[in-house]
């Protein structure tokens, strides 16, 4: 029991130290989750909730596929862009590299997107950073679930 408690204390202390270091460097962490639905063969509109620093905000987004090609093992690889609206806080626009790995033959894929923030408005004007989206995409139904992690400065 004491060993587990010690591990927990060390983990929390390490997390706090890393958070303080990021804050001192002017880095803001973004985390969130949501859903999206295909509105045409190349675009997905989504909504979700994100935590930006200490603030919890609703978001809406539009993802646009710019390329999609066959990859190894039945995967699909390509590029996309995201425009993410964080209400009154402003928008973030990204360019992305995406990978879809098949889970089954019913159209379900594991989704992995690495995004570079290329522009922003409002609170995000002039920022740069990276975001990662992970989740599932069902290409048969057009439904996507995702989790977002990243940071900007």
Image (cartoon, helix red, strand yellow):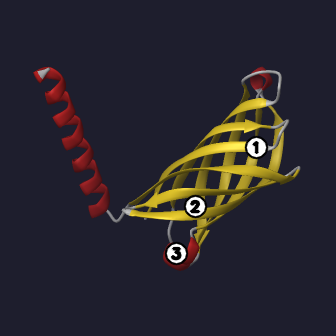
Task: Work out whether 46 lies above or below 113.
Answer: below
- For the residues bearing labels 3 and 1, Cβ distance under 8 angstroms: no
- Specify few, some or many for label 1: CA neighbours under 10 Å numbering under 14, 14-19, or 20 or more: some
Measure the alpha-carbon separation of dots 3 and 2: 16 Å
Q: Secondary structure at mark 2?
A: strand
Along the line of sight, the residue nearer the viewer: 56 or 94: 56
Q: Quadrant of the N terminus?
A: top left
Foreground tag (3 vs 1): 1
Q: Which residue is mark 2?
A: 117
Query: What residue appears at the point 26 percent right and 63 percent down from the top-left corner?
Result: 24
- For the residues bearing labels 3 and 2, Cβ distance under 8 angstroms: no
* Label placed on residue 89: 3
Query: What residue appears at the point 74 percent right and 52 percent down from the top-left corner?
Result: 80
Report the side of 23 relative to 46 (left or right).
left
Which callout, 1 or 2, points at the residue further toward the start of the chain? 2
Relative image position of residue 141 (x, y in whole percent): 83, 39
Measure the alpha-carbon separation of dots 1 and 2: 24 Å
Which callout, 3 or 2, points at the residue further toward the start of the chain? 3
Query: What residue appears at the point 71 percent right and 57 percent down from the top-left corner?
Result: 81
Which callout, 3 or 1, points at the residue further toward the start of the chain? 3
- Rendering quarter of residue 153: bottom left
Q: Which residue is mark 1?
A: 143
Q: Secondary structure at mark 1?
A: strand
- Specify few, some or many for label 3: CA neighbours under 10 Å numbering under 14, 14-19, or 20 or more: few
Relative image position of residue 147 (x, y in whole percent): 56, 45
Relative image position of residue 64 (x, y in whole percent): 78, 56
Q: Residue furthest right?
A: 41
- Specify few, some or many for label 2: CA neighbours under 10 Å numbering under 14, 14-19, or 20 or more: many
Foreground tag (1 vs 2): 1
């Amino acid at each position: 029991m004491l060993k587990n408690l010690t591990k927990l204390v060390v983990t929390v202390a390490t997390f706090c130290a890393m958070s303080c270091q990021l804050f001192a460097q002017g880095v803001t962490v973004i985390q969130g989750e949501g859903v999206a639905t295909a509105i045409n063969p190349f675009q997905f509109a989504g909504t979700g909730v994100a935590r930006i620093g200490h603030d919890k905000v609703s978001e809406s987004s539009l993802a646009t596929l710019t390329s999609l090609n066959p990859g190894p093992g039945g995967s699909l690889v390509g590029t996309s862009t995201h425009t993410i609206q964080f209400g009154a806080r402003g928008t973030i626009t990204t360019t992305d590299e995406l990978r879809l790995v098949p889970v089954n033959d019913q159209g379900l894929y594991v989704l992995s997107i690495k995004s570079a923030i290329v522009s922003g408005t409002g609170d995000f004007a002039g920022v740069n950073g990276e975001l990662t989206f992970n989740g599932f995409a069902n290409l048969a139904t057009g439904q996507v679930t995702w989790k977002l992690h990243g940071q900007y400065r």
